[in-house]
Amino acid sequence: MEKLTLGQWIIDAEINTVRYQNEETQLEPLTMKMLVFMTERLGQVVTRQMLMDHLWGDVVVSNDSLNRIASQLRKVFQPDEDINLETVRGVGYRLIYNQTEPQKSHRINKGDYRKLTAGIFLVLVALVIIFQVTQKENESSTAPAELDDFTQLPGFLLNPSMSPDDKIVAFSWNGGEGTKFNIYIMEEGSPTPVQFSKNGFDLGPEWSPFGDYIAYNSFEFKDQTSSLKIQSLIGNATRTISNIGTLNGISPINWSPDGESIAVSVAPKGERRSQLHLINVENLAMSQITEKKEEVSDIMPRFSPNNKLLLFVRTDGKFNDLSPNQDRTNDVILIDLRRGTERSVLKDLPNVFGLDWLDDETIIYSTRANHRSTIASYSLNSREHKIIFSSPNIRLQGLDLFHNSQQLVIEAQRFDNNIEIIGLQDTSAYSKEKVVELTSSDFYPTLNSKGQLAYVSDFSGLEQLWLIEESGATPKQITYFEEPNNISNPHWSPDGNEIIFSIRAPVGSMGLAKIDVDGTNYEILRRGSANYGSPTWSQDQSSVYFYSDSLGTLRMYKMDIESRKTTPVAKGSAVMARETENGIYYVKFDEAGIWFQGKDGQEELIIEDFTFISLAEWDVFGNSLVYLTPDRNNTDYVVYDLERKEEVKRIRLPRMRRPVPSLGVAFNLAEDEIYITSSTEFTSALNLLSW
């Protein structure tokens, strides 16, 4: 195939490289395939379906797979302002080269014209029929919502807020780099935002109901306090409430529908727990509306459209640094503003990052459990959930509804996770290679005694279990779930013929399931209101170990598979068992470290003062215990001899781009290899969700 040129770019599809100003970049095969396809159709609108057919053929994939490739392609062309991969909302993409002359129109003869008009007529008839049918059908739990790019700016974009007329979005942005955030506003379709504030760390913009003011949180690092600023769009006149404590940076400010009050989440200076307050817009007086409670914060206040109710999220004690990266359990609470009474609407939701009202009786919220983000609606009358959107590897943060249409603007952070092998045979020249060459996110690797690798991947569009039978073999799909699920911590049976794993629906608790390696005999072992996670097998394969939070803390249990009889195993908070001939090893959190319990029931601390960042970063092989010891900057691979009770090997691992041990580590002690999940791509942008 001849090389293609695009401006100053030379595209060599045979070796998957592009060259620009004497710099060569290697592309993944699918990224190159899309680039060639778009270059051959320069300036033309190419639909998503055309691209999916060209890239994957008959293989069914999700829109996320295409979005990732488009994102990779945009990164390639970042050095060249003349080239842009433009999103045509609801249709597809168009590759634009600013130096390209307008394309000449093609003449259509009369015969072609008749065929064309007949074809258009048939398509219109089909669309009318489809529309009528879909209007009559109930929406499925996996509504066909799609994410489209709303902005294409570098850096971090936070806290989107739509103007009342749905024409302008306000957001916090770091300008592409650095740690200074200011408020920007941008009209839909405009390539360039306009800076609105200049204080250096401004977050959480919120439009007034009439579109004449924007309120936001301005944080001062020097004295660690916040100011609420109400800034006019005309003349930039600003009213300020200074030193009111610490406004919760990830908790949106919310303006009442009548414009008279602003609800905020504030922690008193020096404290980490925040409560809700109302600020009178006229005189700037502030009154507290939720009481201070130990180990919880009240965040994300949202007035109902009729101004009678206030919705908010109450987080547990794990949310102790007001950071969106902490795992936490949330309750959604409703306050009757007339009576001052509270009631719980939803309990024990994982990691709520967005909350709003669809109407006076329906709320919408976003959650993140393990590595899957979900947006769902909930009816206060019928108490029914409806999944609007669910996807792995996208962290959905703030969200805001359009006022006049069924659309959301969302702060989305995207990750592309891959499994890599790190060879430790020669520490002066580590070998490192990607395990799976498909364009997908792959995580939770687990090896059996036969050398077969099972892992979780979203290649098919939904998270499924996949299998690589031997090095270099084509991956095989094991599960074929038709509904979105979180799959985590798969673990091989001792004979290498079954896999047990945790599974969670987008809304609901985590359960346990098992399946044969050939995809048969799928069985749910345990599911209920509590979470059941990190399953492992007993040596005789008759039982499984798992943790449960049914008693309010993480306790470890052993369950007989046939009878389902369950018995507690360890004292205190314990997880992640490894059974051996002599007893079981497990992790404790209340008494940090790896512990051993012999058949006499006595416990012994083996590895103490150990900082865990995941439940899958250690294992036992015969007399050897292997684990990773990460800190802020380094990760060590350690082998500990259980007989000699001493460390026999410690290797400092090479620096990786965003290693993610929390998404799985598998050790191959015989070959001195580690299979580890790493994040190879990270982007932050505002996206438009339509459903």
Image (cartoon, rainbow, N blue to C red):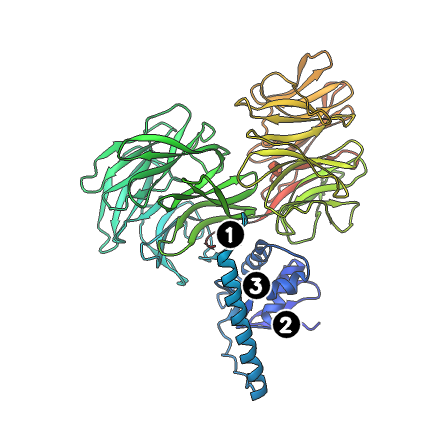
Alpha carbon distance from label 2 to label 1: 48 Å
Q: Is residue 238 visible?
A: yes
Other-residue count near label 1 (Cα within 10 Å), few / some / many at <14 / 14–19 / ≥20? few
Image location (x, y in percent) of residue 424: 73, 38
Identify the residue position indicated by label 1 in the image.
138
Q: Position of residue 138 (x, y in %)?
A: 51, 52
Residue 628 appears in the figure: no
Measured along the vertical axis of the image, is residue 264 above or below residue 42? above
Q: Is 395 placed left or right of 514 in the picture?
A: left
Which of the 4 quarters of the picture holds residue 261? top left
Between 146 and 448, the residue placed more toward the observer is: 146
Which amino acid type corresponds to the residue marked 2 in the rendered image?
Leu
Question: Seen from this angle, which residue lies furthest bottom?
Answer: 110
Q: Which residue is mark 3?
A: 48
Residue ID for mark 2: 4
Residue name at image x 44 percent, y 50 percent: 410
Give the tally of numbered discs. Answer: 3
Earlier residue among tags 2 and 1 = 2
At x 79%, y 25%, the residue is 540
Hey, which quadrant is residue 166 in on the image?
bottom left
Instruction: Give whichever of 78, 171 is nearer the camera.
Output: 171
Helix, strand or loop status at disc 1: loop
Depth check, mark 2 against mark 1: the one in front is: 1
Q: Quadrant of the N terminus?
A: bottom right
As measured in the structure, the alpha-carbon distance from the residue carrying label 2 to the one carrying label 3 is 23 Å
**The one of 530 and 621 positioned closer to us in this rendering:** 530
Query: Could you tell me the amino acid type at mark 3?
Result: Arg
